Amino acid sequence: MEKNILTNNHIMTQRQLAELAVQAKSKALPTYSKFHVGAALLAESGKVYQGANIENSSYSLTICAERTAVFQAILDGERKFKAIAIASDADDFCPPCGACRQVLFELCGKEIDVVMTNKNGEIKSMKLSELLPFSFGEEHLR
Ligand code: THU
């Protein structure tokens, strides 16, 4: 049974969001790893922000698909989010890396659904709070 994601304006299925992540994957620039990743971030406004990984010959300057989507949404004025889908061409589901988990926690909140889809179109969904328990946040700086 496909899970629905509710926003202010409409209902979207996890599969629909996953398909937008698959579509975004075609925009990736994985020059060195050849590992294409796409992301689709659903804001509470109902708008979806797509992202893809962009690599650099100075490897550490590479940016993941998830963060390109989050930063675009933030620059568009979005502050509340429901879910992010992540797609790759791998057999396994592609979970967000540690750096992306921290950015998602800080900017999207621990309650968002992280919807992963593999090359066969299977879907696995987890809460960000499951992926990043006992997280460091702004309250630790007070
Ligand atoms: N990558 C992502 O874009 N998202 C993930 O969740 C995992 C890794 C990218 C970074 C790099 O361009 C490539 O995948 C290989 O690590």
Image (spheres, rainbow, N blue to C red):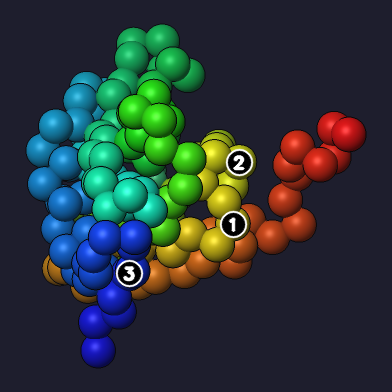
Give the CA distance from mark 2 to mark 1.
8 Å
Crowdedness of circle 2 by 10 Å Cα count: few (<14), some, many (20+)?
A: some
Place of residue 6 in the rendered image (x, y in percent of width and height, measured from the top left): 33, 69
Q: Is mark 3 within 8 Å of ligand 1?
A: no
Q: Quadrant of the N terminus?
A: bottom left
Crowdedness of circle 3 by 10 Å Cα count: few (<14), some, many (20+)?
A: some
**Location of residue 78 (image quadrant):** top left
Q: Is residue 79 above or below residue 129?
A: above
Callout in the foreground (2, 3): 3
Looking at the picture, which amino acid does disc 2 mark? Glu
Q: Residue furthest top?
A: 58
User: Could you tell whether 29 is left or right of 102 in the image?
Assistant: left
Q: Residue at x 14, y 58 (%)?
A: 19
User: Could you tell whether 25 is left or right of 49 in the image?
Assistant: left
Q: Residue at x 24, y 40 (%)?
A: 50
- Can residue 88 be seen by looking at this rendering? no
Q: Residue at x 55, y 62 (%)?
A: 111
Considering only order in the chain, which callout, 3 or 2, is on the residue closer to the N terminus? 3
Instruction: Provide the residue designation for mark 1.
Output: 110
Which element type, helix, strand or loop, lies under badge 1?
loop
Place of residue 93 in the rendered image (x, y in percent of width and height, measured from the top left): 33, 62
Looking at the picture, which amino acid does disc 3 mark? Ile
Q: Is residue 3 above or below residue 63?
A: below
User: Could you tell whether 139 is left or right of 28 in the image?
Assistant: right
Instruction: Provide the residue designation for mark 2.
Output: 106
Q: Is residue 28 above or below residue 21?
A: above
Q: Quadrant of the C terminus?
A: top right
Instruction: Provide the residue designation for mark 3.
Output: 5
Q: How many marks?
A: 3
Place of residue 99 in the rendered image (x, y in percent of width and height, measured from the top left): 55, 37
Q: Nearer the viewer, residue 115 or 95?
A: 115
